[in-house]
Image (cartoon, rainbow, N blue to C red):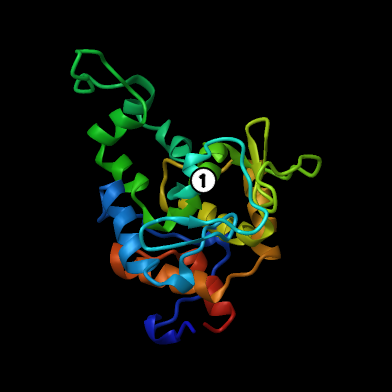
Amino acid sequence: MFKNKFYPFFLLTIFSVSCLSQAGNETVQSFNSAKKTLERKVYNHQSVRRTLYCDAVYDEKKNITAPAGFKTDKHVKRAKRVEWEHVVPAQNFGQSFGEWRDGHSQCVDSRGKHFKGRKCAEKINTEYRYMQADMHNLFPAIGAVNAMRSNYNFAMLSNVKSGFGSCDMRIDNRKAQPPERSRGVIARTYFYMDDSYARYRMSRAQRQLMTAWDKQYPVTEWECQRAVLIEALQGNSNEVVRSRCEQIGW
């Protein structure tokens, strides 16, 4: 279904993850704009409107058709809608910004109260806005799953059961284990963010896990297609995905 016609005709030398060097998003500052662009120009056909973790189908109005056996006892209303998930949580890189940690003199609400965190960083810092709006790091997810994953790091949780029925998304003690189908995509997204932004660095444990997932769960044609479409819209490539796609001859 996905053809090579979208892929650039030139080839780059294949590097290992540790040797790659690439630029991050430098064009899209609005998180809302990024989400709308993904909805309209990347995930713009029913064949690709499937959520990252649970493989749930959704329509152009963002209504979810949950897979058979999916269930949730929390955030029930959000389970009916698709949301855009930061695979590398915004907090993971946001805390490197002073506006997030400490606030800013211009971060004052209508009642005169100072605030900090994500809203302050988004208001004041252009670099933060670019990172937050990077479409290579944004994926559709069932709203309830997005809410429960929160900003937790990924880990293997072999002794934990899924709280989502047939969707094997396990969350416990501020850690999350995603279903196998999403692990390769997650790994290559983590490597992309680590390599593209000096403000974000994976921990040693997280890097070891992502290295294993990258090897165990190869790139798919849709992942290749998605990266090329986002490159055309945002202006920068995901070199990690690009190199994997070259290896499979895509």
Q: Is residue 39 left or right of residue 201?
A: left
* Nearer to the camera, 131 or 194: 131
The location of residue 111, given as percent across then percent down, is 20, 13
Q: Could you tell me which secondary element the residue under label 1 belongs to?
A: helix
Q: At x 45% / y 74%, what residue is drawn?
A: 225
The location of residue 136, given as percent across then percent down, is 42, 58
Question: Which residue bears the numbered disc 1?
Answer: 79
Q: Is residue 125 visible?
A: yes
The location of residue 125, given as percent across then percent down, is 26, 36
Q: Is residue 171 shown above or below 11?
A: above
Q: Is residue 43 left or right of residue 221?
A: left
Q: Is residue 242 left or right of residue 135?
A: right
Q: Is residue 12 shown above or below 52?
A: below
Residue 159, quarter of picture: top right
Q: At x 63% / y 53%, what residue is drawn?
A: 210
Identify the residue at the far right of this view. Answer: 159
